Amino acid sequence: MKLIEAIIRPEKLEPLKDAFLKVQIKGMNVRQILGCGNQHGWIAHNRGSSVMMNMLPKIEVKIVVADDKVKDTVKLIIDTVRTGEIGDGKIFVKPVEECIRIRTGERGDKAL
């Protein structure tokens, strides 16, 4: 199993949720975050002073998938959220040692 963390533009959350539903990927977690990277933000002017606003709103999506679904899931995310502009985000893939469904005690891929 792998944990896939995707940092995406806020406006791409709904299209990504729809894409996940079409291929029956379930069990995602979503969090609103602030971040900065190559996009660098913008300069805001307030009462005569300039301030660099480099912490931009982003969405963090986390899902756990079976090892054999990682490549297709990452491709789906990229195809759904890519605009080709700076600030499209990043995807991180991490190993998951164990998954346990609390309600039934199921383990591994069955618990997903």
Image (cartoon, grey):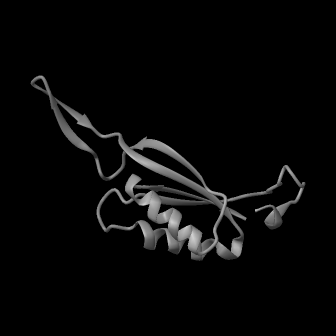
Q: Position of residue 89 (x, y in %)?
A: 41, 57
Q: Position of residue 8 (x, y in %)?
A: 43, 56
In the image, taking residue 19 as reference, residue 106 lies left or right, namely right
**Residue that appears at 19% across and 39% down:** 43
Image quadrant of residue 71? bottom right
- Residue 47 vs 28, above or below: the answer is above
Q: Position of residue 109 (x, y in %)?
A: 79, 67
The residue lying toward the viewer, choosing from 74 and 13, is 13
The residue positioned farthest toward the top in the image shown: 47
The residue lying toward the viewer, choosing from 42 and 13, is 13
**Residue that appears at 40% across and 43% down:** 35
For the N terminus, the image quarter is bottom right
Image quadrant of residue 11? bottom left
For the C terminus, the image quarter is bottom right
**Residue that appears at 46% across and 50% down:** 59
The residue positioned farthest toward the right in the image shown: 105
Q: Position of residue 55 (x, y in %)?
A: 35, 39
**Residue that appears at 63% across and 59% down:** 63
The residue positioned farthest toward the left in the image shown: 48
Count of numbered marks: 0
